[in-house]
Amino acid sequence: MSSTPSWLDHGADPSPPLQDESLDVPAADTPPPAEPSSFASADEKDLPTIILYMRLANMGAAVALVTISVLLMVSLPPLSSFVLAIYATCGGLLICCLETQLKFLRVIIAVNFGFLFNSVWRFIFYMVIASVSWSYDSIPGKVVAGVWIGIAIFNTYVLCRYPGYRRIREKIAEEEDKRIEARISKEVKRQAVKQASK
């Protein structure tokens, strides 16, 4: 009889090790963790809310930019500042038109200003707008410039983090178009009934 324990015997077929249930180590045959597609679908659920926040932030920053630009133009600054104020006003109005999601504006913006749907080009455009606002050399101008820098970072994050952003945005825009058209047709019917009753 051998004095060595059986577990040291190289010729013996070792039995599979028992797994301690108190430890949180998964067994070799356990299924892998959830796939990234399930995380992506969970992210897609949050996307309409994030798009709403992004639209409101963009619209608020655009209104602030247009306001300080118009106030600067009214004060009759030097010609260079006046031209920059016109440029900033046009940029702010472009962002307002982009965020209103009206069908006829959406097509024009997509055709002529498609760079706004690219994360890098949108970031560059927002930083240019921030630098124009900073050049006003006033406290409101510097505050609005800081807001635009924050908006640029937030927009870039959303566009990079959610690849389905454009598809979901188009879907939301189509739903808004349907609601607007339904409201218009309801108003037209109401007016027609009102006219017929007279």
Image (spheres, helix red, strand yellow):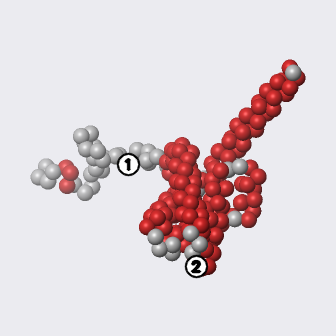
Identity of the residue furthest to the top in this view = 197
> Which residue is located at x 47 percent, y 74 percent?
137
In the rendering, at what x and y percent does residue 175 appear? Answer: 68, 41
> Which residue is located at x 86 percent, y 20 percent?
197
What kind of element bears circle 1? Answer: loop
Instruction: Give the total of numbered labels.
Output: 2
Is residue 60 visible in the rendered image? The answer is yes
The disc, 2 or 1, on the residue closer to the chain's N-terminal end is 1
Image quadrant of residue 174?
top right
Q: Which residue is under mark 1?
A: 28
**Left or right, residue 125 beside residue 113:** left
In the rendering, at what x and y percent does residue 190 appear? Answer: 79, 27
> Which residue is located at x 74 percent, y 49 percent?
103
Q: Which residue is under mark 2?
A: 78
What kind of element bears circle 2? Answer: loop
Of 58 and 33, nearer the camera is 58
Identity of the residue furthest to the left in this view = 3
> Which residue is located at x 57 percent, y 75 percent?
77
**Left or right, residue 103 beside residue 133:** right
Q: Circle 1: is it few (<14), some (14-19), or many (20+) Cα within 10 Å?
A: few
Which amino acid type is marked by label 2?
Answer: Pro
**Left or right, residue 23 beside residue 137:** left
Of 94 and 24, nearer the camera is 94
Which amino acid type is marked by label 1?
Answer: Ala
